[in-house]
Amino acid sequence: MSPINKKKLSKLRNSLDKLDNSFIKLIKKRTLLVKQVLKLKKNKNEIIDKKRIKFILKQIRRKSIKNKIDPKITNRIWKNMIYSYIDYERRNFNKK
């Protein structure tokens, strides 16, 4: 790699790191909201709402296409996030 490209790569990676830090802050906010949602659930079977998951993924696909983002990327990200939070809710259901 040329020195110029190394410098460009370094700048891009710095920008990605800053963006990742923003994601971390958003995940923290999302987690706080999920904690509040969990407090409202009385039964463990309320943790998974298949209709809501389907609706969310459909909306994400639509928004991705509208914003010219590969929907496969956003679908995978949201599915992972959704199922990670389902796991979080299951692990914390009895602790609420």
Image: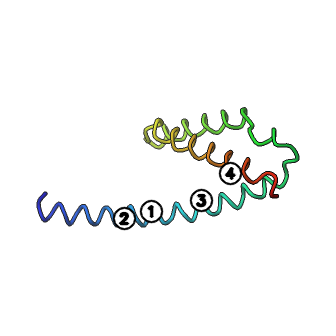
Select label 4 or label 3 by which is in front.
4
Would residue 42 appear left or right of 92 to someone viewing this image? right
Q: Earlier in the sequence, mark 4 or mark 2?
A: 2
Q: What is the C-alpha distance between the residues marked 1 and 4?
A: 24 Å
- Counting from the top left corner in percent of width and height, residue 69 is at 44, 42
Give percent across and percent down for residue 85: 66, 49
> What residue is drawn where x is 72% and y is 51%?
91
Q: Residues within 10 Å of mark 1 (few under 14, many from 20)?
A: few
Distance CA(mark 4)–CA(mark 3)? 13 Å
- Ranked by sequence position, the earlier of labels 4 and 3 is 3
For the residue carrying disc 4, how many other residues have a C-alpha within 10 Å: few (<14), some (14-19), or many (20+)? some
Among the two numbered marks 1 and 4 on one chain, the one whose residue lies closer to the N terminus? 1
Disc 2 to disc 1, C-alpha distance: 6 Å
| Residue 17 horizontal/vertical position (percent) | 40, 64
Q: Which mark is residue 15?
A: 2
Mark 3 vs 2: CB contact within 8 A = no
Res. 24 image quadrant: bottom right
Dot 3 or dot 1: first in sequence order is 1
Question: Would residue 53 be found to the left or right of residue 73 on screen?
Answer: right
Which residue is tagged 4?
A: 88
Per the image, the residue denoted by label 1 is 19
Separation of residues labelled 3 and 1 (CA atoms) = 12 Å
- Which residue corresponds to mark 3? 27
Do labels 2 and 1 touch, CB within 8 Å? yes
Identify the residue at horizontal 83%, vertical 55% (top origin). Answer: 39
**Of the residues tagged 3 and 1, which is closer to the observer?**
3
Q: What amino acid type should be assigned to the residue bearing mark 3?
A: Ile
Report helix, strand or loop for mark 1: helix
